[in-house]
Image: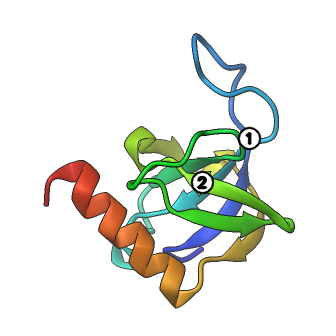
């Protein structure tokens, strides 16, 4: 597991406005802290509208947006299969979006 890796997530049943169905998440936590029992991820969505703070990536040959405004810490046991990693360009876009959304 490394920062920028994309995983299929094993999450409990959604509540409220949470997305149902297959969900993917991008590891945003620093590599130096990945030994912790939880990991910080940004979920993705194929149906979320475009926003300046939602970088677009490709998962399984389909566009998806990284929802940096919905960061969450999950137990590492909720990580399913790895489905890829962000490119250097995509990591840069993710970092810029995180700066915007967190006011850094």
Q: Position of residue 52 (x, y in %)?
A: 39, 55
Q: Position of residue 61 (x, y in %)?
A: 86, 68
Indicate whether 49 appears above or below 96. above
Q: CA gap, disc 1 to disc 2?
A: 19 Å
- Image check: 26 left or right of 85? left
Q: Residue at x 69, y 25 (%)?
A: 12
- Please tell me whether mark 1 or mark 2 is closer to you in this view: 2
Q: Quadrant of residue 66?
A: bottom right
* Mark 1 or mark 2: whose residue is earlier in sequence: 1
Q: Which residue is mark 2?
A: 65
- Image check: 6 left or right of 16? right
Q: Position of residue 19 (x, y in %)?
A: 67, 28
Indicate whether 17 appears above or below 78. above
* SS category of the residue bearing label 2: strand
The quarter in which the N terminus is drawn is bottom right
Q: Quadrant of residue 96?
A: bottom left
Question: Which residue is at the far left?
Answer: 104
Indicate whether 65 appears above or below 22. below
* SS category of the residue bearing label 1: loop
The quarter in which the C terminus is drawn is bottom left
Q: Residue at x 72, y 46 (%)?
A: 46
Give the numbered dot on residue 10: 1
């Amino acid at each position: 597991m490394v920062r920028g890796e994309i995983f299929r997530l094993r999450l409990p049943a959604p509540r409220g406005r949470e997305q149902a169905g297959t969900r993917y998440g991008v590891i945003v936590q620093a590599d130096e802290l990945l030994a912790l029992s939880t990991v910080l991820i940004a979920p993705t969505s194929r149906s979320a509208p475009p926003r300046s703070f939602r970088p677009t990536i490709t998962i399984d040959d389909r566009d998806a947006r990284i929802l940096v405004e919905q960061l969450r810490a999950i137990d590492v046991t909720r990580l399913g299969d790895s489905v890829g990693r962000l490119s250097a360009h995509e990591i840069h876009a993710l970092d810029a979006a995180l700066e915007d959304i967190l006011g850094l």
